[in-house]
Image (cartoon, rainbow, N blue to C red):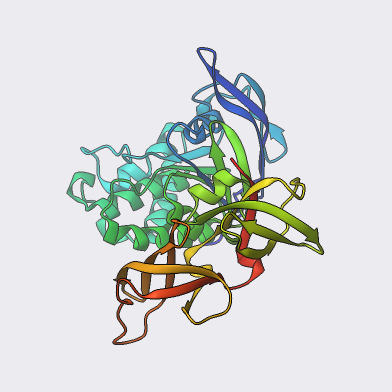
Amino acid sequence: MESTTGQSLTLDDIVHRYAGALAVDHVTLEVQAGELVALLGPSGCGKTTLLRIIAGFIQQTSGKVVVGGRRIDDLPPARRQVGIVFQNYALFPHMTVADNVGYGLAARGTDRQAARKRTAEMLEMVQLGHLADRLTKQLSGGQQQRVALARALAIEPRVLLLDEPFSALDKSLRLDMQIEIKRIQRAAGTTAIIVTHDQEEALGMADRVAVLSQGRLEQFAAPSAVYDTPATYFVNQFVGTANVLPGVLGEVSGGQAGVRLDDGTWLAARAPVGVAPGARVVACIRPENMRLDADTASDGLEGTVELGMPLGATIVHEIRTASGLRLKLSEPRMPGMGPRAAGTRVRLRPASPEGVTVFAAP
């Protein structure tokens, strides 16, 4: 089934205060029609507040919500044409699957025959047509989630909101359901916003990720850009894992910079924005962007292997440098390969300058 129901969504300079406390701090987002955007951040960062503002459950202190070019701030939730999948799914346990999916259509006064047809289409889309007459309380968690999704899509929402939709699922089921929801969202052509604190969920599902901290938008970009080129130190620390090495910024030229670490080692890095040479900085390197050489290598950070952990296809080593820093390094694990022995002397270096991100020292 193909649809073009999704429409663009604009959050224009949204501010919201709870009892004087700033929950959302001048957030602006432009979401394209048919796009899936993740709001990612720790608890209390403002992501659920933004979701509730879009839905109309709360009125923002200032700013505008625009869907399909029309401002919707004056519309009550029932008239915003926004579908919602709640964290606990909010299904009616005494009703059948079909009745749950068709509930929103009935509430809107949709003709019975048209409602039955739409309900059947939605159940086929989520591959639950064979369970139409079963009570939702008799379903598994994954099946209940698909019923909730079908119910939200049945009303042909202009925007679909998903509030931590996988938190109630076992880890083994989450990836399957993430793939399934993305497939369904693509097939329906629906613009979707997913709220999550799970990095893998956001980076794996979303077309773009909005990273929030204390009500502020830290970065809004494609998942690869958020991970590879974090815009702020917070994004660097919150998304993924990074080794942090303090030092002083040296010469900046042609998009590259030199950083003299506190132990005297020089690193080549991507040039930071808005940081002058001579300033205190931190050089951040993800574990997979580090390389491990024998102690006979001529450059890099001297260190000693303290611990090695084989994690399926990779091995993660913790290495203490001569200056006392503890750094993590991950490398592919070949068949039969085990961790390096504790006490092994090694040298560490970045795989390339592009893998070294520099920020002003926090």
Residue 33, percent from left and from top: 65, 50
Residue 125: tell me if it is visible: no
Q: Residue furthest top?
A: 19
Q: Residue at x 63, y 72 (%)?
A: 352
Residue at (48% x, 60% y) in the render: 204
Q: Choose between 5 and 169: the one closer to the eye.
A: 169
Quadrant of the image for the C terminus?
top right
In this rendering, is residue 308 above or below 224? Answer: below
Please state the total of marks drawn on the protein image.
0
User: Residue reaching furthest left?
Assistant: 138
Task: Name the residue nearer the viewer: 182 or 346.
Answer: 346
> From this viewpoint, which residue is outermost toward the right?
254
Q: Quadrant of residue 59?
A: top right
Q: Which is more toward the observer, 74 or 204?
A: 204
* Residue 357: x %, y % from top left: 63, 57
Residue furthest bottom as drawn: 335
Is residue 297 shown above or below 186? below
> Residue 29 occupies which quadrant of the picture?
top right
Q: Position of residue 12 (x, y in %)?
A: 69, 32
Between 2 and 346, which is closer to the camera in this rendering? 346
In percent of width and height, residue 203 lies at 50, 57
The answer to whether residue 167 is seen in the rendering is yes
